[in-house]
Image (cartoon, helix red, strand yellow):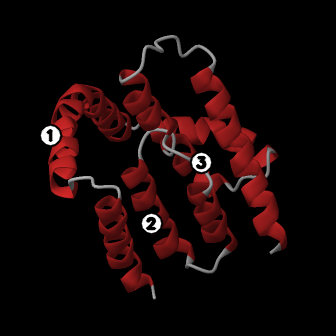
Amino acid sequence: MSNYILPILFIAIFIYSYFKKVNTYDTFVKGAKGAIPLVLDIFPFIATIMIAVALLRLSGITNLLAYVLNPVFSFLGIPSELSELILLRPFTGSGSYALLNDVFLKFGADSYISRCACVILGSSETIFYVATVYFSQTKVKKLLYAIPVALLCALVGAIVACFICRFI
């Protein structure tokens, strides 16, 4: 059934645009044309985040922070093996999934730690990436409250995820 969702959606859009007398092709081209300046505007911000994440991982800072924060995370009910994942998730999605793969290989896909990692990844967001993309295109430049609140919510989400996985 899922193989048919996109074709059905496209057909429905074409039928709707036909009855609304909208030139679908021209509208599509106009949208694609508008995407190019958007990509050029956002690219420096995304490149900066990617470089920062690579530098954090290669320098060993994430491992050091994970080691230092292990007692705090353990006190909060988060397995110490997920410390680096929780630290990197706000920065990078693909890096988080690479760490998830490492967790699967080390502990197995059905382990408590793997279930926690899956729920944490599924219920959290790459906060700095999203903030970079969205706030680079708006007039909002003061992120004094947005980023800390989002990070706190991600931490609470990780705590709740591990608590729920403990009983499932």
Q: Which label's residue is closer to the chain start, 2 or 1?
A: 1
| Distance in Å between CA atoms under marks 2 and 1 | 40 Å
Q: Which residue is mark 1?
A: 33
| Distance in Å between CA atoms under marks 2 and 3 | 13 Å
The residue shown at (56%, 78%) is 109
In this view, 50 is above or below 77: above
Q: Which residue is mark 2?
A: 102
Q: Which label's residue is closer to the chain start, 2 or 3?
A: 3
Which circle marks residue 83 in the picture? Answer: 3
Who is closer to the viewer here, 60 or 96? Answer: 96
Identified by mark 1, the residue type is: Lys
Quadrant for residue 3, please give it.
Answer: bottom left
The residue shown at (80%, 75%) is 168
| Distance in Å between CA atoms under marks 3 and 1 | 42 Å
Task: State which mark lies toward you, 2 or 1.
Answer: 1
The residue shown at (32%, 77%) is 7
